[in-house]
Image: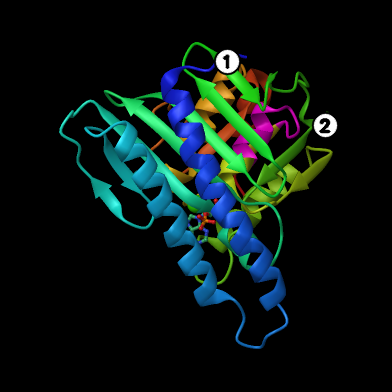
C-alpha cells in the first residue's frame, strides 16, 4: 500500500511516540503493585509522547498549527493546516495496565479533516485514513460493518464516572440502547472506539463530553470506511461538538433515534 507523504509523516510521529508509550507501559505494569500507584509516572509518559509528536510533526511541517491535549493550541504561520493531537488516549487504561490506548493524530486543512493516524502500540495496530483515499488497519482496507438491525449489533459507548458527565442522562441512554442491541462495550479510548467502528468490530459508538483531539482522527477513519459520524443532533460538523454518534448509515440513524427517546 502506497502512503502519501503527509500520512508517512504522521505515521512516523505516532509510531515514535507509541514506542515511547510502550516502554513506559511496561514500567507502569511493574508499578501496579505499589500503593502510591503510577499516576505521576503516567503524566510524564503522556507529556513525553506529546513532545515527540510535536517535535516530529513541526520538523516535517514547520508552518502547521496544533491543537494538543496537554499543550493546547499553537497557531501556525501557514494558517491553513492544523494537527489535532492526543498523545495518549485511554489514559485510565494505561494507568491500570490495560493495553487499550493509542496515539491519535488528525489533520485539518481549512477546517476540513483530511488525514488521520491512530496507533495502538500494545496491539501493534496502526490505523490510517486520508480524505478520499479510504481507511486502513496496517495494510488492510477497512469497511464499517454491514449489519442493519440494532438487534444484531455490538455498540460501544463511554460511561461517565466520578466527577465527569451527566450520570442521569447516561443511565437513560443506556436503558434506551441496551434493550435494542446484542451487546454494549466500554473500552475507554474514544479514538480506538471509532477506529474499531471503522474496522467493523463495533457496529456503532456514542459518547458525550469528548474533546476535538479525542475524535478528530477517528471521525475521518469512520467516514473513509463508509460510515457516518455526527453529533447527537446529526450534525456532520462534529469535531468541536463534544458528542459523537457513529456507525454505518442504518445503525447511525437507529442510534440517533434510540438516544433521543425520552426516559
Ligand atoms: P483520555 O484517555 O485522553 O483522557 C473515555 O471515556 C474517553 O473519554 C477517552 O477517550 C478519554 O480520553 C476521553 N476523555 C475526555 N475528557 C476526559 C476526562 N475529563 N476524563 C476522562 N476521560 C476523558
Ligand atoms: Ca483523549
The answer to whether 174 is drawn above or below residue 3 in the figure is below
Looking at the picture, tell me which residue is in the foreground, 153 or 224: 224
Residue of label 2: 151
Can residue 198 be found in the magenta stretch? yes
Horizontal relation, residue 5 to residue 150: left or right: left
Secondary structure at badge 1 equals strand
Residue 163 placement, left or right of 183: left
Residue beneath the point at 52% across and 45% down: 16
Q: Where is residue 230 in the image (x, y as percent from the top left)?
A: 49, 30
Would you say residue 164 is visible in this rendering?
no
Q: Quadrant of residue 125?
A: top right
Q: Is mark 2 on a helix, strand or loop?
A: helix
State left or right for residue 156 relative to residue 51: right
Residue at coordinates 56% horizontally, 18% vertically from top-left? Answer: 224
Name the residue tied to disc 1: 134
Q: Residue at x 41, y 44 (%)?
A: 85
Q: Nearer the viewer, residue 19 or 229?
A: 19
| 1 or 2: tag closer to the N-terminus | 1
Amino acid at each position: 500500500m502506497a502512503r502519501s507523504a503527509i500520512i508517512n509523516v504522521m505515521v512516523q510521529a505516532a509510531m515514535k511516540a507509541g514506542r515511547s508509550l510502550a516502554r513506559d507501559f511496561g514500567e507502569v505494569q511493574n508499578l501496579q503493585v505499589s500503593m502510591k500507584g503510577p499516576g505521576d509516572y503516567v503524566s510524564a509518559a503522556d507529556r513525553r509522547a506529546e513532545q515527540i509528536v510535536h517535535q516530529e510533526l513541526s520538523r516535517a511541517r514547520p508552518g502547521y498549527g496544533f491543537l494538543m491535549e496537554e499543550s493546547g493550541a499553537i497557531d501556525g504561520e501557514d494558517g491553513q493546516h492544523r494537527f489535532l493531537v492526543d498523545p495518549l488516549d485511554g489514559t485510565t487504561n494505561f494507568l491500570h495496565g490495560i493495553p487499550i490506548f493509542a496515539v491519535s493524530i488528525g489533520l485539518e486543512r481549512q477546517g476540513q479533516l483530511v488525514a488521520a493516524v491512530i496507533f495502538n502500540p500494545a496491539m501493534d495496530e496502526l490505523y490510517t485514513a486520508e480524505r478520499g483515499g479510504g481507511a486502513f488497519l496496517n495494510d488492510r482496507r477497512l469497511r464499517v460493518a454491514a449489519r442493519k438491525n440494532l438487534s444484531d449489533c455490538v455498540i460501544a459507548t463511554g460511561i461517565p464516572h466520578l466527577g465527569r458527565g451527566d450520570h442521569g442522562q447516561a443511565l437513560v441512554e443506556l436503558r434506551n440502547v441496551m434493550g435494542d442491541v446484542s451487546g454494549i462495550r466500554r473500552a475507554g479510548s474514544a479514538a480506538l472506539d471509532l477506529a474499531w467502528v471503522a474496522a467493523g468490530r463495533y457496529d456503532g459508538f456514542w459518547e458525550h463530553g469528548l474533546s476535538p483531539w479525542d475524535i478528530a482522527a477517528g471521525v475521518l477513519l469512520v467516514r473513509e470506511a463508509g460510515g457516518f459520524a455526527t453529533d447527537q443532533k446529526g450534525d456532520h460538523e462534529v469535531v468541536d461538538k463534544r458528542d459523537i454518534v457513529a456507525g454505518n448509515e442504518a445503525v447511525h440513524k437507529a442510534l440517533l433515534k434510540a438516544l433521543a427517546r425520552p426516559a
